[in-house]
Image (cartoon, coloured by chain):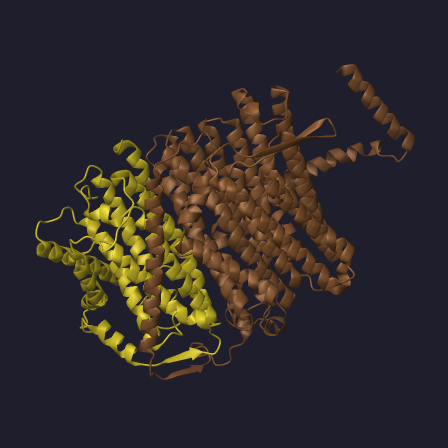
Amino acid sequence: MESLVSFALALLLAPLFPGVINKTKAFIAGKKGPPLLMKYYTLAKLFRKGSVYSTSSSYVFKMGPTVSFAAALMTLLFIPLAGAGPVFAFHGDVIVLFYIMGIGRFFTIAAALDTASPFEGMGAAREAFFATLAEATIFTVLILFFRMNGSLSFADYFHGDNPISLLGPAGSLLLLVIVAMFMVLLTENSRVPVDDPQTHLELTMIHEVMILDHSGPDLALIELGAFYKLFFYSAFLTHLIQPFMFSGALVNGLVFYGALTGIYVFVGITESVMARFKMNLVPKYILTSFTLVFFAAILTMGFVK
Amino acid sequence: MDTLFYALAVILAGGVAPLLLYRQFELMKAVAVIAIAIGCLLGLAALVPVLQDTGPPPMISWSWQHALTLSYRIDSLSVFFLVPIFLICPLAALYGYHYLDKSEEAGRVGINYFFYTLLIISMVLVVCADSLLTLALAWEVMSLTSYFLVIYEFQKKETRSAGYLYFVFAQAGAMCIFAAFGLIYSYTGSFSFEAIDQLPAQAKLVVFVLSLIGFGSKAGIFPLHIWLPHAHPAAPSHISAVMSGVMIKMGIYGILRMYVLLADTSLLFGQTVLVVGMVSGVLGVVYALGKHDIKRLLAYHSVENIGIILIGAGLGMIGVASGSPVMAAFGFVGSLLHVLNHSIFKSLLFMGAGAVLQKTRTRHVDELGGLGKRMPITGKTFLIGSVSISGLPPFNGFISEFLIYFAAFQGLLLTGSSFLFASLAIISLAVIGGLAAACFTKVVGIVFLGEPRSSAAARASEAKLSMTGPMVFLAVLCLLIGIWPEPFVQLAFFGLRDIAAIVPIDPKIAANLVGNLAFAARLFLAILVVVTLLRKVLYARKEVTSGPTWGCGFTQPTVRMQYTGTSYAMSMVEFYQPFVKVRTAYSGIRRIFPGLTTYETRVDDIAEIGMHQFFVHPLMRVFDRLRWIQHGHIQLYIGYIVLTIVVLLLVF
């Protein structure tokens, strides 16, 4: 029950946090910025509208939003949120979930190529390329976690009897993981310095350009799916930086959302102080994250016997 | 066992009949397809008693020419490999009914069916062989018949040279296998499988390496895969489907069989197989990205999938060597299940590619496009095949990849070098998965989506029923295994039953795990259905219009402006230099009003370049020196023979 409530809460709150990023960026730039609930207004507006479809596109174009949304939704069912356990959990669910995200990406890319637009093809190629590199980092993190915790499920990582924590025996290695996963978060969710979500036209290089032709409820599903994906990665990081659990459910919930907000603020700060990389530097950036966690995984050979 | 041979007889009849009936084109094809289908169904039926029986595996043997004993036996591993043979071959034969549609080539089509049935029979005999000699005989028949199938369009020079390349690789591989068998014979003094595990450790290693090279060149391990990307585009598509889906798996069978027979539990075997698997897997998919001939690209994906299968097998061997039964069982089960899965989705993809080729007469992806609208069934089934081969849930490829992942994670509990190997296996599987998805979004996106890039693609129409039928069946099978994997995983576990080295694990572990996988796949499908319905509701009574694609302000788009497969893949391929050689020729822009500019880029296989530079050329130089031996005087040739016999008699 507790899990279902926190899952529903996450679904409702996920569009709030990108507003936090925008507020942070506006604050640093000395501007007032859009209201915190801006994303809700946008979603409501999009859901009310109809759509224009390209004459080039086919059923695959319409499957892009539904599959990517379904994939994002599914990930939130398996990660512990706000001190409660996940709705579903089993040994091995982490592998399944990262592959579920893979199928979401597959259809987003296919939908982009379905429009016959060169811009969208370009974005699709980059999305596919960077994802292959980020996947190596993610699976190395799973290797490391298996060494630390012996499990393959989010529930056991963060909510079991022997959770992965900064205060644990190999907690210092988590520092490397936190940095690397933050880099992956920025990559996978198309944030600066990999991509720039701010510009909404051809200047945007990856995610936004892939969804140029989507409109109305389709676009709303994509946006909402993207919020859920960002929420998933942020929740992942939140669990890593939160050293221990408190006793009360309410306290846990508050601490979780507090830390989560902190991560979004940090994303906002990163976006304010950095420019987007040139495209040829992005692979090096992602490989840096891979190197960090691979190093950590090698270190476990000595730490954890 | 008898039923199996009756089945083979029916199949053979289906091959001989076309030779007599070739004047009635349609009748000939119908007779052949029906006989092959009945034979294969009979063959599948013959497996049922073996599946239920728990006693010793049925065997049969008779002496041939008084000197040689041919013996056959069906153990659980054979049963598992017989399933894809009997499943895929009739479907490919049915597909061939409309694919081979030129009645003026009736004679050739008849011969094609004849060799096709011989190929099926020889593959069955390979997996049932119970002695070195029987195996070698069936293996040779398999190599030769598939050679004749490859050179179906022998008028084309390209086809002939591809066939020659295949022939050379098949025979060189067979040489290595025979050398291994000869070595075994020199120790045991018999052709039987019995005493092979008594070999000294050193001999075992040599035998294993030789058979890895021999069987591996058939399977298409890197760098012995060179024939695949040439032979598959040259062969008719249903032949490519069978060769890639089923025949190259005989190489995997050979490697596994030799491993079982040698019964050696040193870590080195597993590590070698694992490394070969990782290299084949990653480089196979990278080259697939770089290739734009759709059938060549699929051929490189076979290299990749053979890599995945060997990663599983390697992990299993490491599990056996280091006494981790769970790792061993899941490694081998994942590997076997991937054999079955790959045979399903790869033949589906080759059939789809064949339909595209038949309707557009081009294999180059950058000349295609928008075929999803013109060939809806081919498009949809190809999409399903693509998602499956990328290893994404809820389709079958994911199930086997997951089992291999699971074995690799079990390997992380080991210490020392095994930990490193297991980690590398996980990382390579992740990279392979990502790159395969990238490559198949390319194929689907460029070939089936968007706008047609040539008039041939614009005029394409849907393939005939006998071609779309098998594709739909295979696509349904992909989804079925994905959401209902339990019986198929059990079948793979059954495949391991007769392998002594594998300690049976608690069936609950596997049942639990697979049940959860099935749950996750079904959950995802359920969510997807709900979201699709939600989308329907959201669009109820909404204004939906259509217009041209938004060109960011550019108002005169042409189909030539679409992103091409070449540009889609280039940044990824370049990233993997120097393991891939990218050659670009660009004339450049020199004047203010530039003239005609050309740009050409090609991705070359380093294995091919290396083989040419370091093996073929030096060899040719040596042979050039020896040309004087070949002078054309028959009496001297007879002299050579006499001399050889005399020397042999004197020495031995």
B65 vs B353: above or below: above
Q: Residue at x 22, y 73 (%)?
A: A40
What is the count of numbered marks? 0
Indicate the quadrant where residue B326 lies. Answer: top left
Residue name at image x 46 percent, y 29 percent: B500
Quadrant in which residue B622 is drawn? top right
Q: Is residue B401 left or right of residue B591?
A: left
Observer-nearest residue: B314 or A138? B314
In this view, A112 is above or below B322: below
Residue A241: percent from left, percent from top:
19, 49
| Residue A32 located left or right of residue B288 | left
> Which x, y percent locates residue B152?
72, 54
Residue B192 horizontal side relative to residue B29, left or right = left
The residue shown at (76%, 58%) is B21
In this view, the residue in front, B526 or B265, is B526
In depth, the one of B414 and B64 nearer the eye is: B64
Tell me if B174 is positioned left or right of B565 in this view.
right
Q: Is residue B174 above or below residue A44?
A: above
Q: Position of residue B1 (x, y in %)?
A: 59, 39
| Chain coloured brown | B
Percent coordinates x, y for residue B70 in the rendering: 66, 32
Residue for point 32% across, 47% down: A92
Q: Nearer the viewer, residue B83 or A122?
A: B83
The C terminus of chain B, quarter of image: top right
Q: Is residue B165 visible?
A: no
Q: Colour of chain A?
A: yellow
